[in-house]
Image: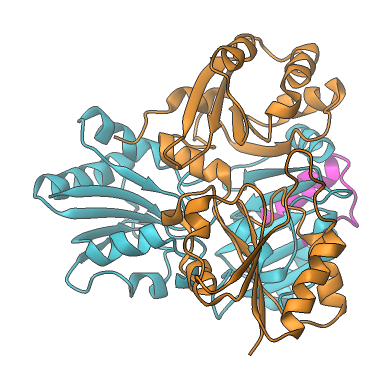
Chain colours: A cyan, B orange
Amino acid sequence: MASLSFIGAGPGHPDWLTLRAYHLLQQAQLVVYDALVSQQILQLVNPYASLIQVGKRSSQRGYHPTEIAQLLMNSYHQGNHTVRLKGGDVSIFARFYEEILPIHEACIPFEIVPGITTASGVCASLACALTHRSLASSVTFISAMEAISPFRWSKLISTSDTLVVYMPLANLPSLIDGYLQAGGHPETPILLVQWCSLDTQATLLGTISTINHQIQRHQFGPPSLAIIGEVTTLCIGST
Amino acid sequence: MASLSFIGAGPGHPDWLTLRAYHLLQQAQLVVYDALVSQQILQLVNPYASLIQVGKRSSQRGYHPTEIAQLLMNSYHQGNHTVRLKGGDVSIFARFYEEILPIHEACIPFEIVPGITTASGVCASLACALTHRSLASSVTFISAMEAISPFRWSKLISTSDTLVVYMPLANLPSLIDGYLQAGGHPETPILLVQWCSLDTQATLLGTISTINHQIQRHQFGPPSLAIIGEVTTLCIGST
């Protein structure tokens, strides 16, 4: 019997896939995945499954959400166990809602399997926390794919003790300018993590005033995540 | 050879445990767990393991973090595969840092395994998202175990499109008073979810002005989570 599942693949390491996600990838007949889903995760897919990469890659255009939904519905109607695989968790900056809506309107049943969001993965791999009894009573997740005005920065800074910035590198210089213009302290610690959970994981711990220079020196690139706030100074590293 | 692992158990359903967590629970010789870790998860533990519940339960006092750390270190020194199991994810309102610090200072190696945080679990089970291209460009996680001043509420409301409140019921009437005093709109939608991912899962969708009454009428209790914001109106429910 056909099935349709939206699955969060987590940051990349197969160990951090959920039991349900693993089971569904093993029985999948079609897997539609984003560019950032790791090769290690894709290797767990049923070897007889078809794989379609729909993420935007350099010069190629990405698929529109309605095209992806159509692809999934066609596969479902052909009787396939169909999986839509996204990096991280499906509920946080994954834009899955635009894909799910046409499927829901077509009355096609589906399942959603949550994934480890990259912020949780970073904390696990470095032994720090996003919240802390005396340092951080709240944490805000923002995406840097769009510009953040100094006005919005000033509210973010004064509200949340920990700020997690998804996809920070696309706009990092303007992010930092906005942060400083909004009155953010140049010595605020910031942690950047690239390729979280994979063998290629790399980290940079700096301050708002130094991080740009560090990124250039270390040729740091995407995929990465930034955590801003005092909690980053507590990283002790899993040993 | 002895080992020591801190594991996030996710919201409760065993299907949402990670592969690594499952593996470590299968080989554990001692599991030290919180009151809210589900029975279904505990049933996956190696049947020859000892289990110690350290969470606070009604009249009993809870263990202090340093006592828990000592328990874990003693077990490690006895040569056991030792697991510290927490509900949800270890990095979000789990207060694991106080437990880890003495272990780190004693130079005992440990591993951290992230878990699905309950907010992600709620979104997966109800088919909604915490962020949305046009409705919510940020999400803030707060805990209601401590009071939130109207001043802090006013910043939270004006900063983040989606607010996730962990453990909201302990202080809900005062939370709502603070939200309204801070200028929050009484018609703002709020979603409450109890026992996320388990057979006993229950949901209430209301507004800031109605939710208190609904909670009393439905005798809603902990463990639960609240999501405040327009994204809650998009829940379509997994079918």
Residue located at (34% from left, 36% from top): B238
Look at the image and say whether residue B116 sits in the magenta stretch. no
Look at the image and say whether residue A180 sits in the magenta stretch. yes
Q: Position of residue B151 (x, y in %)?
A: 86, 23
Residue located at (26% from left, 42% from top): A69
Left or right: A232 with respect to B33? right
Considering depth in this image, is B145 or A5 the residue closer to the camera?
B145
Residue farthest bottom in this picture: B1
**Count of marks placed on residues:** 0
Considering depth in this image, is A165 or B173 the residue closer to the camera?
B173
Q: Quadrant of the C terminus of chain A?
A: bottom right
Residue located at (71% from left, 70% from top): A126
Left or right: B37 with respect to A67? right
In which quarter of the view is residue A234 placed?
bottom right
Left or right: A154 with respect to B116? right
In which quarter of the view is residue A198 placed?
bottom right
Q: Position of residue B189 (x, y in %)?
A: 56, 18
- Give above or below for B111 relative to A118: below
Q: Position of residue A168 (x, y in %)?
A: 64, 55
Q: Is residue A34 visible?
A: no
Q: Is residue A25 visible?
A: yes
Considering depth in this image, is B110 or A51 the residue closer to the camera?
B110
Which region is colored magenta?
Answer: A172-190
Left or right: B63 with respect to A53? right
